[in-house]
Every structure is written in structure tokens, then in C-alpha cells.
Amino acid sequence: GNSVTQMEGPVTLSEEAFLTINCTYTATGYPSLFWYVQYPGEGLQLLLKATKADDKGSNKGFEATYRKETTSFHLEKGSVQVSDSAVYFCALIRSGGSYIPTFGRGTSLIVHP
Amino acid sequence: EAGVAQSPRYKIIEKRQSVAFWCNPISGHATLYWYQQILGQGPKLLIQFQNNGVVDDSQLPKDRFSAERLKGVDSTLKIQPAKLEDSAVYLCASSRSRLAGESTTDTQYFGPGTRLTVL
């Protein structure tokens, strides 16, 4: 079946540091890939998405590129802020047949001033 | 536009009791999802509706869980009877997609969730 694997957290960084959160997936067919973010006390919200190979999703300074050859969708940001502290979820929805969304376990990011 | 509404926000019950959660999606959104999120894990889809029809309920424990979406708008998820392992946050989400195939690329909008504790 489909699966999403994220790096273990928490990831702890100082402000302005470079961020990478790894995400790899297993799926048949051609899934769409998503990053959702959950800020403290709030619901999940879409951060960015990519729907086909080599697409780059970007939003709020975050980027992720859909790499079909490595089945990865790593999240990056060049300079994190304290306000980026949240839990980040990688997810996929496979096209064709079952459309069940599959989420990773989430990676907690803590950014210190 | 108003977001996805859920109630109650918190619920504490004893095992073997029943509980119901309510969700009102964003106006005009055809697709509605219910997820279970156990502490430390990602959301797991329980059931997906498109309008008032079920798209997928393969991960719904049907011996104790049920859900309905009458009139294709709001939805109710019920657990009867509850077990200790049902303690989790229950998330509702909605998206615009009117066809199952469209949901693969569509943005899901999540409600704040209902935190259920089963004692």
C-alpha cells in the first residue's frame, strides 16, 4: 500500500538557519504530494503541493520538489523564523483507483531566537 | 469565507459509552473527510464523502464507527461503543472537488478537531 516516511523530530534550529525536513514515499501510479503545517493550537493547513514529477511547490519561503527517481519530496527553507515553529506533515494522494490520502507521522520544528 | 466547523472541541467518556462528532464543511465544498489522529501519528482517513455518497470507507471500523452526510452538507461521525484505543483527535476536512479524480490535487481545509479521551 501507500506510505509516507518523514524524518524523526523534533528538529531544533536557531533563527535564520537552513531547514530540511526529509520525506520519502511509496506509492503505485503517480501521486500528488503535499506538505501540511499545524501551528500550535490550530488545525492543519496546506503549505504547498506538487502534482507531477519535477514540479516545485513553494509558499512562505518554503520549497519542495517532486523527485520521482528518488521518491522524495523534501521540505526546505533558507532562513527559518521563530514563527515557523510547528508540526509539518508530508502527505500523498494517489491518482487512479483508491484516492485515500496518506499522511506521514509529522515532524516537529522548534526554532529558537 | 468561514472555515470548517467542528463540535465539540473536547469530549471525555468512559469505555463502552457512545459519542458523536459533528462537522460543517466550507460552503460549497463537495468532498468531506473524517480522519483519526492518534497522538504522535499522522491523520488516518476514516471515511470520504463526495456530496452525500461514500467514496471510501475501507479504513472505517464499521463494527463500532458510523458516519453520515445527509443532504450533502454537514456530517456526523459516531462511535458506539467506544474503546480505550479510540482516544485520539478526530479531524474533519473538506475540499471543492466534485469528482473523485479531482480530489487527488485539491487542497483540503481542516477543522480544529475534536479531542476524544476514553477512560
Image: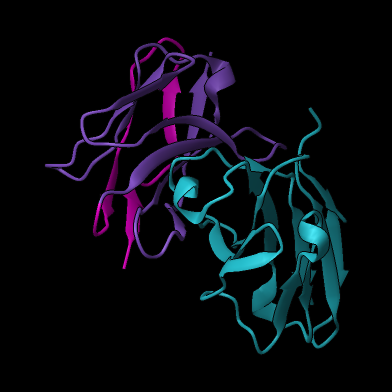
Measured as percent of width and height from the top left, residue A38 is found at 59, 37
Q: Is residue A103 above or below residue A110?
A: below
Q: Quadrant of residue B86?
A: bottom right
Magenta span of residues: A1-29
Measured as percent of width and height from the top left, residue B81 is found at 78, 87
Q: Colour of chain A?
A: purple
Q: Is residue A33 above or below residue A83?
A: below
Most extreme residue toward the left is A69
In the picture, measured across the screen, residue B99 lies left or right of residue B62, that is left
Along the line of sight, the residue nearer the viewer: A68 or B12: A68
Say which residue appears at 70% left-offset and 70% top-offset: B87
Q: Colour of chain B?
A: cyan
Q: Quadrant of the N terminus of chain A?
A: bottom left
Please check the rendered image and state whether residue A9 is part of the magenta-colored stretch, yes or no. yes
Q: Is residue A85 above or below residue A23?
A: above
In the picture, measured across the screen, residue A101 lies left or right of residue A78, that is right
Measured as percent of width and height from the top left, residue B106 is found at 51, 40
Q: Is residue A89 above or below residue A58?
A: below
Q: Quadrant of residue B60?
A: bottom right
Along the line of sight, the residue nearer the viewer: B29 or B14: B29
Measured as percent of width and height from the top left, residue A90 is found at 41, 43
